[in-house]
Amino acid sequence: MVNDPWRIFLTTDHPNGGPFTCYPHLIRLLMDKTFRKEVMGTINQDALKYSALASLDREYSLYEIAIMTRAGPAKSLGLKDRGHLGVGACADITVYDDNPNREAMFEKPELVFKNGELIVRDGKIVKVVVGATHVARPSYDKAIEKSLKSYFDDFHTVRMENFRLSDEEIVDRGRGEIIVQPTGARTA
């Protein structure tokens, strides 16, 4: 129901998100209204009555899916070297064989490049590379930690200290690197 694909992201990090292994199925549902209607016939019809799903005729294009899965999230996070193929891009690229069944198409990429290096061919790993972990380290008032600790102690079964990770833990015993992303107020 949203007309601007720059405002929609597939994510596994939201409480309502699904695992990334479901993305091909979700993409097909977004791109193929006939398939979507078939699937609606298999779900609880009483629940479907209370949903707007049956009234949706829109089918997303490959261009819109690329925005929702690559360009939009990168732009939203302020990652200037990702989500595009322009000058200065890191060259993380996935190539698919065009298939009218979009679920089959997105299930197995033909080629995957990481930083311009071929790492997957025809669904098989051809090179293992160590990636980087992107982190944000915004400034904040450290005094907040006292009330947060109290909250954790009162309402959680895990101690607040267990959420802190050292750089060594983040990069898996020294392999890989950490890229600190700039933080600040959003700009247009």
Image (spheres, rainbow, N blue to C red):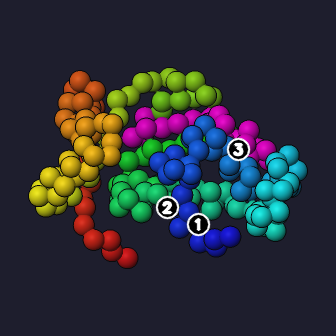
The answer to whether the residue labelled 3 contacts the one labelled 1, judged by CB atoms less than 8 Å apart, is no
Q: Residue at x 24, y 43 (%)?
A: 153
Left or right position of 79 against 144:
right
Tell me the magenta residue range. Answer: 99-117
Is residue 35 placed above or below 54 in the rendered structure?
above
Q: Residues within 10 Å of mark 2 (few under 14, many from 20)?
A: many
Q: Residue furthest front?
A: 154
Name the residue tied to disc 2. 72
Q: Residue at x 33, y 42 (%)?
A: 156
Check the picture and name the quadrant holding the C terminus. Answer: bottom left
Residues at marks 3 and 1, CA–CA distance in whole angstroms: 18 Å
Residue 25 numbered mark, or none: 3
Front-lying residue, 67 or 11: 11
Tell which tag, 2 or 3, sits nearer the viewer: 3
Q: Is residue 121 magenta?
A: no
Between 89 and 181, which is closer to the camera in this rendering? 181
Amino acid type at image mark 3: His
Distance between the Cα atoms at labels 1 and 2?
A: 8 Å
Q: Residue 5, labelled with which disc?
A: 1
How far across and down, in percent of the image, does residue 108 sit?
Answer: 65, 34
Kind of element beneath mark 1: helix
Q: In the rendered view, does 166 fall on the left or right side of 60?
A: left
Q: Quadrant of the N terminus?
A: bottom right
Choose the circle earlier in sequence order: 1 or 2. 1
The mark that comes first in sequence, 3 or 1, is: 1
Residue name at image x 59 percent, y 72 percent: 4
Q: Is 102 colored magenta in this rendering?
A: yes
